[in-house]
Amino acid sequence: MDYAATTPILPEISQAMIRCLSVDGDFGNPASQSHHYGWDAAKNITTSRKHVADLIHAKPQEIIWTSGATESNNLAIKGALDAYKYKNKHIITSKIEHKAVLDTCAELESLGFQVTYLQPELGTGVIRPKQVKQAIQPNTVLISLMMVNNEIGTLTDIQAIGLLAHQHQILFHVDAAQAAGKKAIDVQAMQIDLLSLSAHKIYGPKGIGALYVRQDIQKHIKTQIHGGGHEQGLRSGTLATHQIVGMGEACRLAKLALRDEQKRIQHLRNKLLQGLQALTPVNLNGHATQHVANYLNVSFLGEQADAILFAIKQVAAVSSGSACNSHHATSSHVLNALGHNEKLAANTVRFSFGIYTTQEHLETLLNHLVMVLKENKVASQLSFV
Ligand SMILES: Cc1ncc(COP(=O)(O)O)c(C=O)c1O
């Protein structure tokens, strides 16, 4: 139950990747344009680029391959801001972004840029378009916000903010690493200029992602990795055909499965939340309706909280925050921004669901909790006697 951290590669995707590795497959360098090895590899890249573009309603030439959403976020933010080097320019983001955005913004602050970190609504994590509007200054050049929060699953009203950004001629970057495959994305209708994607959140391989860069702003984004001028000159380096094919297939399948899978997952999420609420007092972190179904983030309240946390970790692979933060001892910056104190943050679990999560998994977990709570009750009655 930790699909937000990463997902396994689907068998049909790994098969497609394997076909691009060895001498009996399309192993060539897609930049080699003098023989069929290169042409065959390039054909795979073209097909994959189209699959990624189709998932977000973009044009294939607007897809720039990267090593993942971390690099996409870096390229989007630094690439957009580098054009204004050493000028007193302003960025708007929020306190609950992924570290790949927050650390990049902190780096830019150290170079003299101004950053406004919007405070989300306490408890729900919602960032309202009105707040974004109030934060706009005459020198604002970029708004960078995530579509779906990776810890609590709260959705941002991207379309309303895209409209605002364009009314003020501000570039709009969206980190959609956790939204792809879970929420329909239309970069045109949502007026997005830059959008980050990652394959390993949607049953593709790790180490590959993409940045959508709207065609008419490509010349304004400053390259961060120089080399052979690949990817419209925006990101050089030999294209990793097998990784790209993996991402293309993941996007193709994500688009096909989106609606039905979301319905199934919403049902599972409701079941687990109701099951937990029936057992013990819990606090739901995130918005009750403005969310995607794949996340359930709860803090356990009351005397049994420690026992419950321990019991969950005995039978389920869950996390207390994002995987990127879990090696740090400090509590999650997202929960802090939601208004949680250290104790409540420590009693928090993020469940995240995916293709292989079944009703039986939830029943196993809930039955285990019932048993542990019963044992605890008996133990406390015995010690009372
Ligand atoms: C919202 C968000 N942005 C960016 C990233 C980083 O993605 P990647 O692992 O592809 O670098 C993640 C991964 O956890 C994420 O959840």
Image: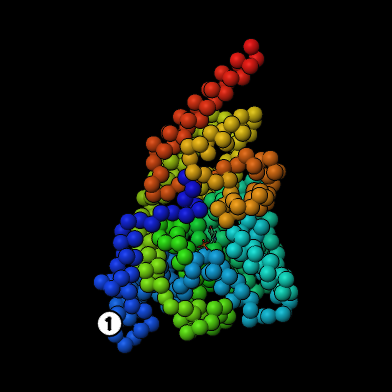
Instruction: Determine whether, in the image, residue 261 is placed left or right of residue 25.
Output: right
Q: Quadrant of the C terminus?
A: top right
Quarter location, residue 267: top left
Looking at this view, is 174 or 156 the one in front? Answer: 174
Neighbours of disc 1 within 10 Å: few (<14), some (14-19), many (20+): few
Q: Position of residue 11 (x, y in %)?
A: 32, 56
Q: Which residue is mark 1?
A: 36
Q: Position of residue 195 (x, y in %)?
A: 51, 68
Quarter location, residue 220: bottom right
Query: Quick one: which residue is furthest to the top in this view?
Result: 385
Report whether the residue tagged 1 is closer than 8 Å to ligand 1: no
Query: How is the protein colored in the picture?
Result: rainbow
Whether residue 33 appears in this view of the structure is yes
Query: Quick one: which residue is furthest to the left in this view?
Result: 24
Whether residue 189 appears in this view of the structure is no
Q: Position of residue 302 (x, y in %)?
A: 64, 30
Vertical placement of 281 versus 344: above or below?
A: above
Q: Residue at x 50, y 27 (%)?
A: 370
Instruction: Determine whether, in the image, residue 112 is placed left or right of residue 375.
Output: right
Helix, strand or loop under label 1: helix
Instruction: Determine whether, in the image, residue 194 is placed left or right of residue 266.
Output: right
Q: Position of residue 331 (x, y in %)?
A: 66, 48
Vertical placement of 329 versus 103: above or below?
A: above
Q: Residue at x 25, y 71 (%)?
A: 24
Looking at this view, is 385 or 198 the one in front? Answer: 385
Vertical placement of 378 versus 347: above or below?
A: above
Q: Residue at x 38, y 82 (%)?
A: 31
Please name the amino acid that badge 1 sits on: His
Q: Residue at x 33, y 70 (%)?
A: 21
